[in-house]
Amino acid sequence: MRAPEVRYAKTVDGVHIAYLVRGSGPVDLVYTLGMAGNFEIEFEPPWGVRFLERLASFSRVILFDKRGTGLSDRVLGVPDFDMRADDLGAVLDGAGSERAVLVGNRGGGSLAAFYAAMHPDRVLALVLYNSWARTAWAPDYPFGSSKEELAAWREEIAANWGTREMAKRFLESVAPSHADDPEWIRWEARSLRHGASPAAALAFDEFEQAIDVRRVLHTVQAPTLVLSRSEAARARSADLAERIPGARHVHVPGEEWMPYAGDIDVLLGEIERFVRSVSAEQATFERVLTTVLFTDVVGSTQRVAELGDGAWKTLVERHHALVRAMIGRYRGTEVDTAGDGFFGTFDGPARAVRCAKAIIEAVRPMGIDVRAGVHTGEVEIIDEKVGGIAVSIGARVAALAAPAEVLVSQTVKDLTTGSGLVFAEAGEHELKGVPERWRLYRVVV
């Protein structure tokens, strides 16, 4: 295989994401690496070349390095799911791909699943290998890693990142048959060093440990194959498959967790059969996962009485201009305006929350307060109009907000992990016309 030709996709915030394209098959396939990788090093040795050539035999493979890792730009801070999804979208655009099969390996599966939920129109199918819905153990998630295991892993990163000793210990758990092979150890150590620095690895690991995408998995519309290999991965993969509608779980025999080790023909054979089976299916989905934002002016009736109709009309026009500017700045879409209220949609929950905060701050000098509510859920797109239960929930959440307050549903809180947003509990509430009680959160920062 000839040397990779690295290209760069530029994101909306100016970050360059390194990617490369291999093969010319009829189906685009994006292979997503784990926490921190470098695709040049990852697929440099014979076993990596063989793995990539096999994928490229039935698809057009697109590889990329996440921002802050590998060959992509180094950045300050740790990107959240919104940013990572934007980066994946930029890579698809740069590679000229309208729809692709997303193959997520380990932690890369969480990003693939999140993107599939948020952008169903761009995902043909989903393959999740040895992946999970949540990283850490919880009372309702016994498959996660314990605090002790996660702490021990962070200590290993801090003390030994990129060393041959760490590479050997890592291979003992993910590729035991190669743990004593000097070539594999040397390659794994290089992969770690060229993927991220120790400090960056610790920062990325902090994000990885907080991952929990359970609340969006039920909205994934793409045909999904969940693959596991090794007994350690079986339970988490089975749980992951149960959470995605129609997903199929296949456990491949063997104890080699790493996809390039062991019998890769069996593993890749499963992927090829699945990809070929769905490549002809071009389903059109009418339901997508969207974040809705509702805002309205508090005490508008009293303000009309104080100002008079003419002055109030001028104030509302200024308010509308500011709100529209903020929605545009945060790449939202204005859906409807009723009186002094706005309804907008966003393809990322963190942007919607930040937009709500920006609106409140922007209109405050005008002497008015705005309340806002944000929710992420399935909406129906019919004749370009947005509707469904998620819209009703968003409106009900906004109605409960206090002046100059942003309230969000728990789904929004869960999906903005790593964004830097801080929330405080606002209690459980009944939302008119909506089943069950809903736990809401107040945006603090």
Image (cartoon, rainbow, N blue to C red):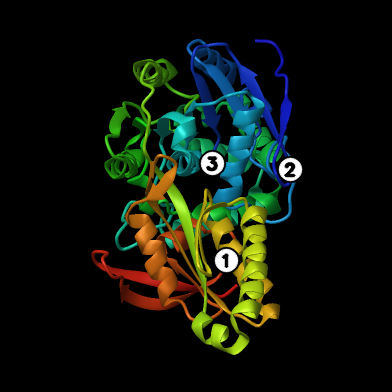
The residue tagged 2 is 15
* Extreme residue in the bottom direction: 306
Query: In this rendering, would 63 be left or right of 366?
Result: left
Q: Estimate how packed mark 1 is, as few (under 14), some (14 to 19) or many (20 or more) residues with alpha carbons within 10 Å.
A: many
Q: Nearer the viewer, residue 370 or 65?
A: 370
1 and 2 marks in contact (CB < 8 Å)? no
**Residue 178: horizontal and vertical position, in percent?**
51, 27
* Residue 281 versus residue 244 in the image, above or below: above
Give the image quarter of residue 391.
Answer: bottom left
**Residue 92: horizontal and vertical position, in percent?**
60, 30
Query: In this rendering, would 242 be left or right of 227?
Result: left
Name the residue type under label 1. Answer: Ala
The residue tagged 1 is 356
Q: Residue at x 60, y 69 (%)?
A: 357
Residue 122 numbered mark, or none: none
- Can you see residue 212? yes
**Residue 429: horizontal and vertical position, in percent?**
32, 75
> Of tags 3 and 1, which is closer to the observer?
1
Q: Nearer the viewer, residue 202 or 270?
A: 270
Query: In this rendering, would 174 be left or right of 312?
Result: left
Residue 169 numbered mark, or none: 3
Query: In this rendering, would 89 be left or right of 12?
Result: left
Q: Secondary structure at mark 1?
A: helix
**Circle count:** 3
Q: CA distance from mark 3 to mark 1?
A: 47 Å
